[in-house]
Amino acid sequence: MFRSQSYYRMMRSLDEALAYRKDGIIYVLIIGELPTPCDEAKVVDKYPGTRTYVRDPGSAELFIEIGRKPGYEDLFCIQTLIPFFIGEEIQDSGHDTVTIYVNGEAYKRIPIEEKSSSH
């Protein structure tokens, strides 16, 4: 289910991904590198949230698209690694993991750490 082949072609690496939940909100943090300054990584969907299913997939989900920035599709870009950071919130109190999808393919499933509320 988890394949990294097409992801690796688009992007150097997903260096680190972690998720924690506090007060019913999952905070997903992703750090990685893009192959050129002409590329971008952006969140396009999440579950629960904007995506709906007839049957629960058993995991919270975050969908990332990686590719050329608009207007840079046909340009030559120097190959130099560019770091990126994605931080996303998912309102969810029922799942124990987050599945990260990159360009439509399941890439990685990470556990959700529970953080207690301090009032």
Image (cartoon, rainbow, N blue to C red):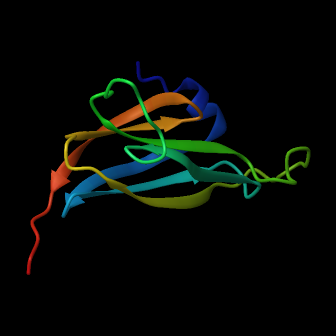
12 or 69, which lies in front? 69
Residue 12 can be seen, yes or no? no
Please provide percent x and percent y for residue 89: 38, 59
Q: Is residue 25 above or below residue 34?
A: below
Considering every residue shown, the one lying at the far top of the view is 1
* Residue 67 located left or right of residue 87: right
Residue 63 can be seen, yes or no? yes
Please provide percent x and percent y for residue 8: 58, 33
The quarter holding residue 109 reads top left
Instruction: Say which residue appears at 29% left-offset and 34% top-offset.
Output: 59
Instruction: Say which residue appears at 59% left-offset and 34% top-offset.
Output: 103
Image quadrant in which the N terminus is located: top left
Q: Is residue 8 above or below residue 33?
A: above
Image quadrant in which the C terminus is located: bottom left
The quarter holding residue 24 reads bottom left
The number of numbered discs placed on residues in the rendered structure image is 0
Instruction: Say which residue appears at 17% left-offset and 52% top-offset.
Output: 113
* Residue 99 located left or right of residue 13: left
The quarter holding residue 21 reads bottom left
Considering every residue shown, the one lying at the far front of the view is 54
Please provide percent x and percent y for residue 85: 50, 61
Instruction: Say which residue appears at 76% left-offset and 53% top-offset.
Output: 69
Q: Is residue 10 above or below residue 105?
A: below
Please provide percent x and percent y for residue 83: 56, 60
